[in-house]
Image: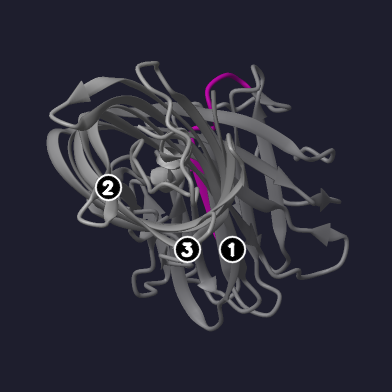
Amino acid sequence: MTRLFALSALIPALMTSTALAADVLAEPVVVEDVPIYALTGSFGLGGFWMPEFDDGLFAGGTDDPLFGGIATVSGSVTTGTYNDWDIILGFNLIGGFASDDSSSSQSFGGQGTVFISGLSTPGGESSITLNTANDLTADVTISPPPPGDPVPGENDSKVDISGGTTSGAAVALAEDGSGFVIGVATVDGGRTAFGAIADVTGGIAVITGNLDGLEITTNTSRDLFYTGADLTIGLGNASYGGAAVSVYTGPSYRGLFQDTDTDVTIDLAEVGEGLTLPDFTISSEEDLDSHYFGGILGGTASWGIGTGMIFSIGLEGGVYGVSASWRGHDTYSTGGGVFDDPNTEDVEPITQLPVTVEGADLDLDDIDDGTIAFAARGNAAITWAVSENQAISLGGSLEYLSQVATVTHDRVSDPAYDNGASWTPGDPPTGAPSVSWGSMVNFAITASWTGTF
């Protein structure tokens, strides 16, 4: 085996396994009967087309590509020969990161009703009752306030707000900080009622009546971490039919880690003087992790295209067993509210905001454990020798993965307006995740350095 045959062995490794390429020397230097080690490092830009992610909010699903960087480290050692073919052991390590940020805003008008939940909803005896049937009033009843005693106040059974001929708002916070409720009733410019509950079990917000000026903003940040490792054994021949060829196989692992952060903010229309209505924000953090364990089979071919230059291509297939898990967590906050003298029953408003509470820790493990995924990968590269023991390359790769987990949520409901609205635990929307499967395609353009010793 020639030294530069080994030196260029790792160039097609991006998104595949350790592979072989052609001799890049016009007069190859032959090293007989000793192991030849090769090491390659690659770095470049990559893009990932993932299955549609649906946060269940008004922004709907998104399948925008995620862009970022990817790096690989590969190595090989020639251990001997078999029928004029070199026996090569190799490894390949992959690490990649990509992200995408998006924002959308939904404006409302006219009569209507909107429900928005967190990743989970409150339990126990929680309830929200909104009444806008009377021409001159809008009433809100939230029962009970969050766990613990409301602060301040004496009645821990409910928060009542009646708009009457004016407007009112209140926020009550649990004494132990584990939750809060918001109630808003307005009649200026039209009857509107808003109620929200946020505590350690979940969150829900309901708005009904005149929705003029209501704005709901959704900001989504998606991060993707892609990892992989291969161990291979292969056979390589530097002069097979005018090309350098190799075949290899071995165990393989891929890890796909999707992190999604979503902030949805409900901003009510401001009405009246001396009253600034509070907003309500649900911040959701979701982690969807997938692990792929299996094996790969591939091959490469390389041709000299000039003194000190080669062109290489590689193809690889893989079969993996897949397991996935999902974790979610909500944080609820309210701020921006300043209340002079709202109508409240036994519960005075908090005048110093913001207030933030943590929701439940949620998880789904062993999602569709036993799913089988198929992978197809291809790459091409041009390699230049810069010395007897070193080479640089420019290349590209493409990968298809047949099974990638994604999440859909049920977090929004907008039934027809009916002079009010009510919610109790178990009513839609529940916010619960539903995991489905789609395919992924990614590409990378990289620069590589290879050395032998």
Badge count: 3
The disc label shown at residue 102, or none? 1
Q: Which residue is mark 3?
A: 65
Which residue sits at x=57%, y=19%?
148
Q: Earlier in the sequence, mark 1 or mark 2?
A: 1
Q: Which residues are magenta?
A: 139-149
- Where disc 3 sits, the SS reads loop
- Where disc 2 sits, the SS reads strand
Quadrant assignment for the C terminus: top right
| Residue in the foreground of this view, choosing between 215 and 361 | 361
Q: Earlier in the sequence, mark 1 or mark 3?
A: 3
Q: Which residue is mark 2?
A: 239
Identify the image quadrant of residue 19.
top left
Q: Which amino acid type is marked by label 1?
A: Ser
Observer-side mark, 1 or 3, equals 3
How far across and down, in percent of the image, does residue 245 sit?
A: 26, 47
- Residue 126's place in the image compared with 313, above or below, is above
- Most extreme residue toward the bottom is 110
Q: Are marks 1 and 2 in contact (CB under 8 Å)?
A: no
| Residue in the foreground of this view, choosing between 121 and 386 | 386
Q: Which amino acid type is marked by label 2?
A: Ser
Identify the image quadrant of residue 113.
bottom left
Q: Are marks 2 and 3 in contact (CB under 8 Å)?
A: no
Q: CA distance from mark 1 to mark 3?
A: 11 Å
| Residue in the foreground of this view, choosing between 376 and 32 | 32
Label 3: how many residues lie within 10 Å, few (<14), some (14-19) or many (20+)? some
Which residue sits at x=35%, y=17%?
33
Whether 49 is among the magenta residues is no
- Residue 211's place in the image compared with 427, above or below, is below
Res. 398 visible in picture: no
How far across and down, in percent of the image, does residue 149 sit?
A: 61, 20
How far across and down, in percent of the image, does residue 60 sit?
A: 42, 66
